[in-house]
Amino acid sequence: MLKRLALSLLVTGPLLSTLMAVSGVVYSDLNKNGKLDSGEPGIEGVLVTNGNQVLASDESGHYELTEEGGDFVFVVIPNGWETRLTDDRRPLYYHDSSLETANFPLWKTEKKSVAKALVLADTQTYTETDVGYLRDSTVEAILASGEKFDFGVTLGDVVNDDLSLLPKVNRALSRIDSTFYYVNGNHDLDFDAVVDGEAVASFEALYGPANFAFESGPALFIGLDDVRFPVDVNGRKTYIGGLREDQFVWLENLLAFVPKEKPLVLMAHIPMFQPDIDGVDTFRVADRERLFDLLKGRTNSMFLSGHTHYQRHYFHEEEQGWVGESPLHEYNVAAACGSFWGGPLDENGIPVSTMWDGTPPGFAILKVTADGFRSEYRPTSFPADYQIGLTVPKRIKEGQGWVSFYANVFDGHEGWTVTARIDEREQSRGMGHTLAWDPGYVAAYLAQDDEGQPLPEKRLPDPKICFHLWKGYFPSDMNTGEHQVTVTATHPDGRSFEAKASFSVEP
């Protein structure tokens, strides 16, 4: 039975709309007391919404929403402003829509030309022990990196069904000195919900609207609940990726205020591509096509997702319904929990939790400028420059041909160039992108139950196809003795990473 979060606020499902008008003022809270005091000026042009109607505050900061809406009235925090935070660093940019008057205090801050975001997918804690793993691995790694962020976001599956753990995860992540936004996943729901949209009631009681937006730097970031639950599939109560009609209406109304050239980042849990090579639909095709139609002409857009517990950069093209000058980039971020906090323990007592594509657990950093997006992936338990996992034979027979080796470029995609050089040979050899299991992960998967090793509490999961794997072959003319292979992976923007491994050639 699902353990549900104890609520101090009763929240009805977002489909139970209200017709009550709500008005108020968006203002500069000069003394930061959260109250509209005499002499505190209104802020013009701030978007205010009730989850349906969207409008901009007038020259005095005043707004009035009169159309049907959802359970919340909230603002789209503009670049150069911030709002109050809870003790665990959640932003208070919303009010209950049952209020007749709702004022929004904002604090003026530096207006930035670059947005820098910390992105976590699937922290997915099952127990308080897992919350400790999150705190002692992911959070510690982020703090040790010395990186500073404009905000952080989790891409859903904050917990694994036990909603009583949500506040504990919040506290763990609050050690990071950033405002944190939370997107819901399929494991953050009220599973006794009978109508799609009601399943996020507990989540919204803690975090506010499941669909929200804010500016950071030059970009607009939009968080979306793309988990449709409950749906019936062959008589089974389950979920699927997609959007409801009211979400499409809100998005259309919101985007009407957004210039076509403005960078746009959509953040949700379930990816829009079909993650399994068997072609089973996990996101409703009609919803994806309708969303792409709403984004038509917005070529400076990207999509962040989680859910899969692997890493993949997917580029939507005409075949997927995207029409644009260039493909729509979806970054499906690897899970912070890796393979569900599973596998053998490392030297720090944390599960290695390597994902089924061979990617180690970690976090992503996204930078957005007016011209585009730049992402990078940081493994939690390794140095920042550990970006390639090599699988190389330890010993090779002299003169033997077609001996292969593999490079798992954790953040790679088909646009990367990967080369290998043996020893100090002048000529580097190109490696071919391939779709296969990562042999290094297969070896770890098989070794986890070796005799003499303690059995892990949770096993590493079965291997799956790796979408960022390259294959190379050793030359057959190597002399006997010790050798070294150096693999270089180069991003399309020129960034490059290197990994080395030793092996021997024997007579």
Image (cartoon, grey):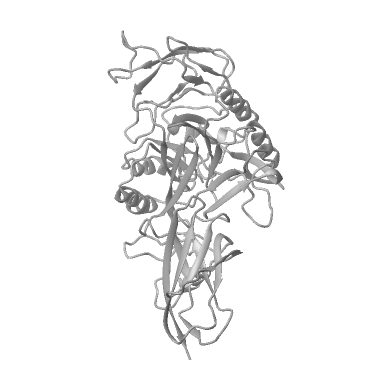
Q: Choose top left, top right, bottom left or bottom right for residue 482.
A: bottom left
Position in image of residue 333 (x %, y %): 50, 49
Seen as rendered, the residue at the extreme front is 426
Q: Is 459 left, or right, of 320 in this rendering?
A: left
Q: Is residue 126 visible?
A: no
Q: Choose top left, top right, bottom left or bottom right for residue 244.
A: top right
Position in image of residue 374 (x %, y %): 47, 44
Position in image of residue 148 (x %, y %): 33, 41
Q: Report the residue at 36% width, 64% height from top.
A: 346
Seen as rendered, the residue at the extreme bottom is 507
Q: Choose top left, top right, bottom left or bottom right for residue 249.
A: top right
| Vertical comparison of 82 with 423: above or below | above
Q: Is 274 left, or right, of 191 in this rendering?
A: right
Q: Is 277 left, or right, of 75 in this rendering?
A: right
Q: Report the residue at 52% width, 54% height from top.
A: 311
Depth order, front residue of 191/167: 167
Q: Report the residue at 60% width, 33% height from top.
A: 298
Depth order, front residue of 428/345: 428
Position in image of residue 409 (x %, y %): 49, 60
| Vertical comparison of 445 with 494: above or below | below
